[in-house]
Image (cartoon, rainbow, N blue to C red):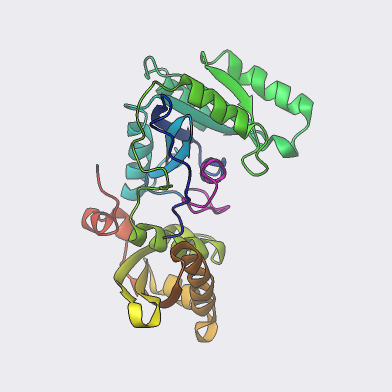
């Protein structure tokens, strides 16, 4: 599949560094955008809607000198349902067993109770370097940035405080170089051409959900889940056939997703199909249904069915 970007394997010619790095922060601070930029292609979906990331997403960056496995996490927030509780638990649990933590804050937003809560969590993390990344510096004044640094620097003994722009890439190379130097010596955990360890079904479902997020409003985006019901490759047509269900919690939400005379569902399908074709490197036939499962975000068996496991 095209998400595997070929990179040179020089593991035999020099000692490599490798390790796992957690990315945490409040919702909508740019965690997924940063990981995608570092990896060089989309492995986590992006949206301006808070709480877009629901699972722990692994992105693999391989260079001649080593390999970093980034772990993008759900935004830490005050949960309103079982899904939210599980998302926050996933983010916090990710801090265990990593070689470094990237704590991202938004330069356009003042430090809030959510940031202070994360700092209190970080104080329980022992012997793991924590980087404070101040994101979106491309759209703030220098004096504002200095004030943000001042407001955080005495809260925690950060290994580094690095202003970045996940969108434009400002200082991202500096960050990656710093991480590579800090990681312990070790082998590649994944083949050099792999950029994520998630199965194709997961990535395809996420691409469909991303289009739903972009084209719905208010509570609808948060009530959406996507399940790939069937997927097969037809070699005679060089075509991947995907049947997927978009789940929501109420009939009114279902009507919004379908749209007038099915127009919105058709648009979601067209946009998702385009991304899936780029991902898979083949033609795609995508068929979508919209189904209702009332209050699925509070039903544990539904969360398991949609892949939100406790693990």
Viewer-closest of 242 and 194:
194
Q: Residue furthest left?
A: 301
Residue 34 occupies quadrant:
top right
Viewer-closest of 100 and 257:
100
* Main SS, magenta residues: loop
Q: Could you tell me which quadrant the C terminus lies in?
A: top left
How many marks the image carries: the answer is 0
Residue 254's spot in the image, x, y percent? Answer: 42, 74
In this orientation, does residue 224 appear?
no
Q: Residue at x 40, y 32 (%)?
A: 11
Q: Residue at x 64, y 44 (%)?
A: 167
In this orientation, does residue 92 appear?
yes
Q: Residue at x 61, y 40 (%)?
A: 166
Horizontal arrangement in the rendering, residue 34 relative to residue 222 (left or right): right
Give above or below for 286 relative to 141.
below
Residue 178's spot in the image, x, y percent? Answer: 55, 23
């Amino acid at each position: 599949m095209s998400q595997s970007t070929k990179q040179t394997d020089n593991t035999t010619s020099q000692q490599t560094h490798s390790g796992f790095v957690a990315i945490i922060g409040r919702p909508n601070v740019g965690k997924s955008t940063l990981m995608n930029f570092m990896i060089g292609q989309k492995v986590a979906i992006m949206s301006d809607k808070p709480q877009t990331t629901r699972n722990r997403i692994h992105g693999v960056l391989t260079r001649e000198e080593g390999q970093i496995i980034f772990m993008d996490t759900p935004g830490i927030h005050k949960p309103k349902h079982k899904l939210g509780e599980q998302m926050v638990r996933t983010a916090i649990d990710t801090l265990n067993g990593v070689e470094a933590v990237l704590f991202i804050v938004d330069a356009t937003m003042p430090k809030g109770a959510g940031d202070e809560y994360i700092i209190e969590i970080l104080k329980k993390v022992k012997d793991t370097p924590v980087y404070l990344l101040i994101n979106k510096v491309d759209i703030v004044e220098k004096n504002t940035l200095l004030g943000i640094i001042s407001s955080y620097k005495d809260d925690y003994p950060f290994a580094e405080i690095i202003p970045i722009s996940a969108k434009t890439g400002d200082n991202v190379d500096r960050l990656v170089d710093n991480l590579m130097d800090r990681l312990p010596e070790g082998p590649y955990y994944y083949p050099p051409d792999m950029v994520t360890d998630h199965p194709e079904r997961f990535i395809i479902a996420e691409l469909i959900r991303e289009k739903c997020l972009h084209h719905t409003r208010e509570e609808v985006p948060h009530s959406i889940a996507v399940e790939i019901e069937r997927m097969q490759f037809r070699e005679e047509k060089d075509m991947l056939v995907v049947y997927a269900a978009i789940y929501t919690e109420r009939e009114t939400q279902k009507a919004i997703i379908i749209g007038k005379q099915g127009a919105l569902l058709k648009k979601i399908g067209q946009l998702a199909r385009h991304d899936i074709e780029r991902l898979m490197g083949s033609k795609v036939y995508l068929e979508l249904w919209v189904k209702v499962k009332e209050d699925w975000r509070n039903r544990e068996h539904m969360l398991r069915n949609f892949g939100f496991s406790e693990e």
